[in-house]
Image (spheres, grey):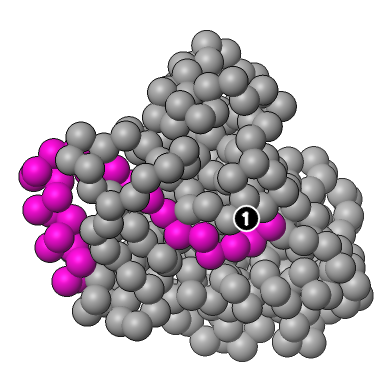
Amino acid sequence: MVDLTVRGAGIFGLSIAWAALRRGARVRVVDPRGLGAGSSGGIVGALQPHTPDPWNDKKQFQLESLLMAKDFWRDVDYNSGLESGYGRVGRLMPLATDQDVTLARSRCKHAEFRWGNNALWEIVEVSGSWCPSSPTGLYVSDTLSGILNPRKAIDSLAKAIQSQGGDITTEAKTDGPTVWATGWQGLLELSKLFEQPIGNGVKGQAALLEYNAAGQPQIYADGLHLVPHLDGTLAVGSTSEREFETPDTTDEALDAIIAQARDIVPAIADAPVLQRWAGVRPRAKNRAPLLGPWPSRSGHFIANGGFKIGFGMAPKISEIMVDLVLEGRDTIPPDFHTNLIQT
């Protein structure tokens, strides 16, 4: 017997299981496909805030979660003996036009007000090999952004859960309350069940290159992420494909991404491609995570829709979901809540 069953061994499922264990619950995680079988098993790992204006509850939640990340992953890694690859390395974004510079300067004031002393959003001049070209010669530098290695982070979470007596398996019956963190397929099943659009999947393709820029800020330019992992590899990606035939195969769309990355940072022009990856990210209808009780199914809960920000949101999502499931305290933001599902 367990106090909580979690269906889904991606970032939401595992982080919720970990938070529940830390509060003394007996936990079992069940996923027939194994650890990180969906988009949580990807290779990019960019933990980035949205712009500091206009402000809303989602951005406040994201800020709080990103600030929790250092302690969250330090605790996980300590208990697992593994490394998640987490680092708060910041982010560089080139400013292409004078209009972009003006907008970025206004955001400096918003960040100072909203982020306080926790992080900076500032306009800088930079140079060197790890620097994309900028027509204005200026860049946004934010110090809130972090990185991790998704696969290593999933492995570290799983090992930490097991170190504290949690069970991770591919098949098991449901005991106690159940959290459904079942990715894009789960969103499609909910859409069918409730006969309304709840969410879907968006395919992404990414590549891992052999290039050591460990400790450098990640780069976001022309809609592309370049993430220098602490293990000396470089992730670039990703595509956003709403229509796709196969969820886990790469094609010429990834070739274009790799070429674009080499144009952005010429220093990686000859960096060998170590790995090509494709997967489908769960996107809820309103782009925010979907959290809360499963409508009309007592004792069951939903945690889904991480899309591109799942790893960044996980530390705080895990806490508020455990508040709800184990303690009955509902602090889920209205825009995230399963109350949005029409029943």
Residue lying farthest to the front in this orientation? 128
Position of 206 with respect to 259 (left or right) is right
Left or right: where 38 falls relative to 204: right
State which quarter of the image contains the N terminus.
Answer: bottom right
Amino acid type at mark 1: Leu
Which residue carries the number 1 mark?
148
User: Considering depth in this image, is 148 or 65 the residue closer to the camera?
Assistant: 148
Q: Quadrant of the C terminus?
A: bottom left
Q: Nearer the viewer, residue 311 or 86?
A: 86
Is 48 located above or below residue 315 in the figure? above
Can the viewer see residue 315 in this picture?
yes
Can residue 125 be found in the magenta stretch? no
Which one is nearer the viewer's eye here, 41 or 190?
41
Q: Quadrant of residue 315?
A: bottom right
Query: What range is drawn magenta here?
Result: 85-110
| Element under disc 1 | loop
Residue that appears at 75% across and 83% down: 22
What residue is shown at x 86% (from left), y 59% (from top)? Answer: 168
- Residue 329: horizontal and vertical position, in percent? 52, 86
Q: What is the x, y in percent for residue 194? A: 46, 47
Does the magenta run of residues contain 96?
A: yes
Residue at 44% across, 81% down: 331
Answer few, some or many: residues within 10 Å of disc 1's Cα (few below 14, many 20 plus, some between 14 and 19). many
Residue 35: x, y in percent?
79, 48
Which sits in the foreground, 3 or 121?
Answer: 121
Residue 10 in sight from this viewpoint: no
Q: Count the numbered circles shown.
A: 1
Image-based side of 271 in relation to 107, left or right: right
Dividing the picture into quarters, in which one does residue 311 lie?
A: bottom right
Query: Which residue does the image show at 32% across and 34% down from the upper left?
Result: 133
| In the depicted structure, whether residue 141 falls above or below residue 161 | above
